[in-house]
Image (spheres, rainbow, N blue to C red):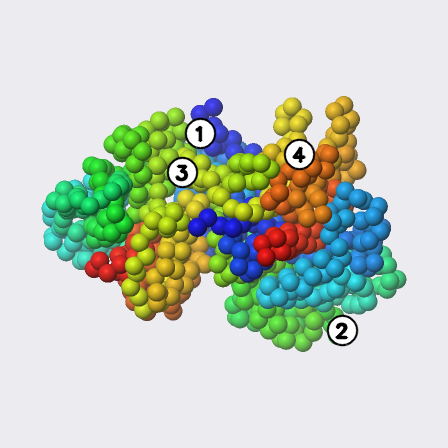
Amino acid sequence: MSPDAVVIGAGLAGLTAGVRLAEAGVRTTLVAKGPGATHLAPATIDVLGYAPDLVERPAAALPSFAEERPDHPYARLSPETVAASADWLREHVPTLAYVGTIEENLLLPTAVGVPKPSAFVPEAMAAGDLRSGGRFVFAGLRALKDFYPAYLADNLSQAKLPTGVTVEARAVHLTDPGTEADVSPLGYARMFEDPEFRTVVAAELLPRLEPGESVGFPTVLGLKEHRATWLELQERLGRPAFEVPTLPPSVAGIRLFHDLRDAFVRAGGRFVIGSTAVGAGSKGGVVEHVVIQTAAARPTPVEARWFVLATGGFAEGAIFLDSYGEVHESVFGLAVSGVPAAGEPRFVPRYFDDQPMARAGIAVDERLRPVDAEGNVAFDNLFAAGAALGGAEPWRELSGNGLALASGFAVASGIVEGAS
Amino acid sequence: MDTMEWVRGSLDHCVKCTICETFCPVSNVTPLFPGPKYVGPQLERFRTDDGSPDASLDYCSGCGICTTVCPQGVKIAEINSQARAKMKARRGVPLRDRIIARPSAMGKVGTPLAPIANWFLKNRAFRWLVERTLRVHRKAPMPLFAGRTFQSWARRHPPLTTATKAVVYFHGCSANHFEPGVAQMAVAVLEHNGYRVIVPRQDCCGLPLQSNGLFDDARRYVRKLARNLEPYARRGYDIVATSTSCGLMLKREAREILDLEDDEDLRTVSAHMFDICEFLLNLHERGELRTDFRPLEMRVPYHAPCQQRGHGIGKPALELFDLIPGLEVVDSDVECCGVAGTYGLKTEKYDIAMEVGAPLFRQVTEVATDVAACDSETCRWQITKATGVPSVHPVELLYRAYGLA
């Protein structure tokens, strides 16, 4: 009765692989130390934003992008796979109801007023698309720190848009009746689910709106009741209302996490959070089990036929640099590719410069199985997805969620096809 | 490095991602507790032997969810427990906290006097008086004494003669003094599966003392308990617990919070501890669990308590429930019932605990046709008190479905 598949990691890659496997009838256990980047990132599916210039049409840009970068995960993930994974996500995350296509990027404002390219976005963010220009007003909330609508609007008014259109943006500051000095985006999301609170907000906002303006809120319009909350507020305001991503916690990402976790459990998956995969056992090039550290002082081996490594990269501690300068992968001890050779600089002083270590990660074959420096498959039944994959610089390319989603999707396809 | 140091040192892994704060049930309802990240890894840097910069620490309920969900492995709840104990040591621990933290001592006094003690516990004037004098809220859930301990039942209970295997049962204080029925049902379910159930003499695990900052007393209790259980663990017996929070205390919390990582007895016991649902599901995975379940036609809300989730084993009760025909179980997605052991009993925290639990209480009321299920005793009492819906340990549903009633 051990599971057929074990997925390690509960970020977008792990959840996607887990839900797809469970729904395909593969008995799946998902183990994670904690939730992943869903809770931090805006929940937009950024496929390819910069290569290195601004990408307007990801589907058109991806083939040459991948060709020029044979070590990039997109060299293993076709635009068709990326598009199919987005279609899949749209069906599985009804709370966010993703819109967009891989053919073109929307340009959404960030919290600091930078137009950011994304291919697939939650429906409630779509009205913030800046490509056609327009008039926007951004609403700040009294006790929400780290969201300054005047700063946002000012930067946005000066932003150069590729289409040559201009954006008129201004800010309003709301003074809700609360007394707390510091409310998180999640706290406001819960408050917005209360119709009375929305009444107060709408009453304060309506007289201050000018004709033709769309209203941008921080991403706080409800949690579980997000769609109803957003739609009802939009109706009250009589004009498009949209959400702008905030600093963490990401309420949109939490909605994404909830929908995928619920889908996984509904499909019969076993969801284990709070335990760490600390090692694995293998025989003849096949992983036999992973070792889980639960609360008890004993190792818990979990056997399965297939294993998915979706533990993340450096930021998640899944790939780490030890004090001898060696780079390791934490569960299977996999070879890490893209590490500068001994004696070569690993880092350069300026943070935003091209860091030699930036693309370090797990190299994979066509089926997303980890390989060593010579291209030999590490284990026949081990697959990798998400930020563990080397060769990418998601923060520079704006490709993080695109890679996580498509690789989690593809890994599950590979396993399901192999099983049948 | 001693435990305190590596537990405290784990704060350096905090990347301020705020994931713990999105889960914290307390900071989500009251500004009195500014959240685990702020109070834990951030403020800990400013704490010295002379004091803590923020008394809000006292409003952490100790549910431990922050540690369970931290993707960086920061021991947030443990850091806060240790800091709270130091703060209480400096400021003095209220008499109330010294009393409610000793369930086995209360049980020893209350059990022989059960009818009188229970009359007082049910008496509104007495509860009012207790609230005024001790600051235990008059509406807080309070268990009644069973009058006869599980230990005395177990001593007279004939061992299963047909057993082919044996298991040790750690029942905890509450099953001994307040809910011996839970323990008897656990024994019946284990025996039904062919186990001889060994019930060693045992006292409190020290968890309530630990949560109330009385670390020295907690250490004495848990070390003694570990000493009593260790000989069985050493001989290879598995130890099962129906009290999921006390089981977690023996698995991990005592070692990490009370700085007992080097206690060999405790480590050996931890290596053999199983939550009863974890144990039974393992049996099922090996094809050894009897599945002669009769239908239970009811809809049951299930709440996995914070401490159950701290085991890091998923929710085995749900998979066991799946084996029972007719039983429809709705898993609560609410983080916490609010009570967190003794937190919700305290007058100044009662309202917070009730607000934390409010979404759960709504779900329980909406879903339950007969009973609610929950692995932890104090959470069951809280749910029952708040909703009027009787709350049972998952093992009771297995017991009923096996037709052992």
C-alpha distance separating marks 4 and 3: 30 Å
Label disc, if present, on residue B339 of the rendered structure:
none
Q: Is residue A191 above or below residue B279?
A: below
Instruction: Tell me the quarter of the image containing the C terminus of chain A.
Output: bottom right
Q: Are marks 3 and 1 on the same chain?
A: no
Q: Which residue is mark 3?
A: A296
Residue A288 % position (x, y) = 52, 40
Q: Nearer the viewer, mark 4 or mark 3?
A: 4
Please report the residue visible at 34 percent of the width from the left and 49 percent of the height from the top. B288
Q: Is residue B132 above or below residue A91?
A: above
Q: Which residue is mark 4?
A: A335
Q: Is residue B336 left or right of residue A142?
A: left
Q: Chain of mark 4?
A: A
Q: Are marks 4 and 1 in contact (CB under 8 Å)?
A: no
Q: Are marks 2 and 4 in contact (CB under 8 Å)?
A: no
Q: Which residue is mark 2?
A: A212
Q: Which residue is mark 1?
A: B4
Q: Chain of mark 3?
A: A
Residue B365 % position (x, y) = 36, 67
